[in-house]
């Protein structure tokens, strides 16, 4: 196939398919290195965080003890956790296992929720025991009560540099950040906030599915791309945006802005100047601009401030536990939406 035809064919396939084809085309001896290099866009850490897992598995042992306490059949069947007296049994469990891996974080988290959030001990431990055992459909199904409180504080620290805006963020637990984005596109459309043909802006480079989703037949948004194409004088990429491109967001025909911050693959957070410029545009020119931000790499950037911190009323923030915890297989993420937001108002 000549180069022109090959280029045309490549344009019709998805970035993930392209990556596979490039690996197939690589010389056998180069395949291993090619795979390492070409798979980089998927963003799978090659390490894991041990402490949260040790804590989680220790909590799992407690959950099982609680079930066996109620019923313990030799066939491998047990009862379900009971609320009454569960906190004092949990404290005894912590005492008995205080040298176990993960015990310290488990105890600290328990004390944190009791002291900082006046959690009722039995309600808290019962929620944890049922959650880790998984014997009930989760209620509330949006996110469990104490999980929401903990993750709200975590996001204040990691997404808002410990300076969260006033008010609270409602959280929605999802099966990873990718699912979160799918839910958001669907939900915005089902609620008549985005319609076929509406103008949206996508800041690129972005996680590749965001380039493709808006083109699906059920969306067909009118997408403009804002490119991070600023360069140094000697020709190096800065992976930042030109003001004239950012100013296109002043047009109210642009209803939504999709951003990956820090970006993937370059891994650069938006500069404070660009962030300030967008904040200014929303305040003065396009107050109903919906900002959908994927901040899954925010935890790697010291003193990171997400759009959820800077423009809380306009922002839907997606945060995933996949990256910082090396937990892509667990499919754990949240969408954060401020209680006072332009979405409800519209
Ligand atoms: C920017 C970005 N968002 C989301 C994801 C996917 O996250 P999750 O595993 O939570 O679906 C990736 C994975 O590479 C990513 O790079």
Image (cartoon, grey):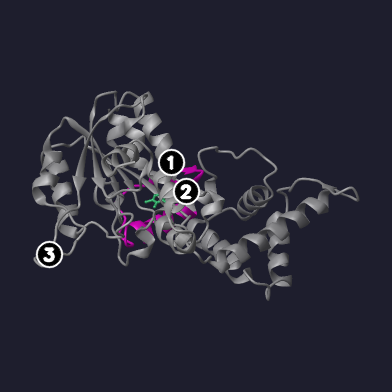
Measured as percent of width and height from the top left, residue 341 is found at 30, 37
**The N terminus: image quadrant:** top left
Crowd class of label 3 (few under 14; some 14 to 19; many from 20; radius 10 Å): few
CA distance separating discs 2 and 1: 7 Å
Which residue is identified by label 3? 232
Q: Residue most toward the bottom?
A: 99
Disc 2 + disc 1, Cβ < 8 Å: yes
Sequence-wise, which precedes: disc 1 or disc 3?
Answer: 1
Asked whether residue 136 is drawn in magenta, I would say no
Q: Is residue 312 above or below residue 323?
A: above
Residue at 19% over, 61% down: 237
What secondary structure is found at the residue carrying circle 1? helix
Q: Is residue 216 above or below residue 73?
A: above
Tell me, yes or no, if residue 253 can be seen here. yes
Residue at 28% over, 46% down: 259
Crowd class of label 1 (few under 14; some 14 to 19; many from 20; radius 10 Å): many
Sequence-wise, which precedes: disc 2 or disc 3?
Answer: 3
Residue at 12% over, 40% down: 248
Marks 1, 3: nearer the viewer: 3
Which quarter of the picture shows residue 182? top left
Q: Which mark is residue 180?
A: 1
What secondary structure is found at the residue carrying circle 2? strand
CA distance separating discs 2 and 3: 36 Å
> What residue span does the magenta drawing correspond to?
150-177
Measured as percent of width and height from the top left, residue 210 is found at 34, 41
Q: Is the shortest distance between ligand 1 and the CB of mark 2 under 8 Å?
A: yes
Q: Is residue 254 left or right of residue 30?
A: left
Residue at 69% over, 61% down: 90
Q: Nearer the viewer, residue 84 or 101?
A: 101
Q: Nearer the viewer, residue 186 or 1?
A: 1
């Amino acid at each position: 196939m000549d180069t022109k035809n090959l280029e045309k064919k490549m344009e019709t396939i998805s970035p993930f398919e392209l990556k596979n084809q490039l690996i197939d085309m690589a010389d056998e001896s180069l395949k291993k290195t090619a795979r390492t290099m070409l798979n980089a866009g998927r963003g799978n850490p090659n390490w894991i965080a041990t402490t949260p897992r040790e804590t989680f598995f220790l909590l799992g042992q407690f959950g099982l003890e609680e079930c066996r306490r109620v019923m313990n059949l030799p066939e491998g069947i047990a009862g379900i956790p009971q609320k009454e007296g569960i906190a004092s049994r949990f404290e005894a469990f912590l005492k008995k296992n205080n040298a176990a891996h993960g015990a310290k974080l488990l105890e600290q988290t328990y004390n944190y929720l009791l002291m900082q959030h006046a959690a009722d001990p039995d309600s808290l431990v019962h929620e944890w025991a049922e959650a880790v055992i998984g014997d009930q459909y989760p209620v509330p199904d949006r996110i469990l009560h104490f999980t929401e409180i903990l993750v709200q504080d975590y996001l204040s620290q990691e997404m808002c540099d410990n300076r969260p805006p006033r008010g609270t963020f409602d959280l929605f637990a999802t099966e990873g950040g990718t699912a979160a984005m799918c839910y958001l596109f669907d939900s915005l459309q089902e609620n008549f906030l985005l319609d076929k043909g509406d103008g949206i802006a996508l800041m690129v480079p972005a996680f590749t599915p965001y380039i493709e989703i808006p083109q699906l037949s059920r969306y067909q948004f009118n997408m403009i791309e804002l490119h991070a194409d600023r360069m140094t004088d000697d020709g190096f990429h800065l992976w930042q945006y030109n003001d004239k491109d950012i100013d296109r967001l002043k047009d109210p025909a642009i209803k939504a802005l999709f951003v990956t911050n820090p970006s993937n693959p370059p891994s650069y957070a938006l500069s404070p100047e660009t962030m300030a410029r967008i904040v200014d545009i929303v305040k003065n020119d396009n107050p109903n601009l919906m900002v959908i931000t994927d901040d899954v790499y925010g935890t790697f950037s010291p003193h990171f401030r997400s759009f959820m911190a800077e423009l809380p009323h306009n922002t839907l923030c997606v945060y995933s536990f996949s990256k910082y915890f090396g937990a892509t297989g667990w499919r754990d993420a949240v969408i954060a939406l401020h209680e006072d937001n332009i979405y409800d108002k519209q």
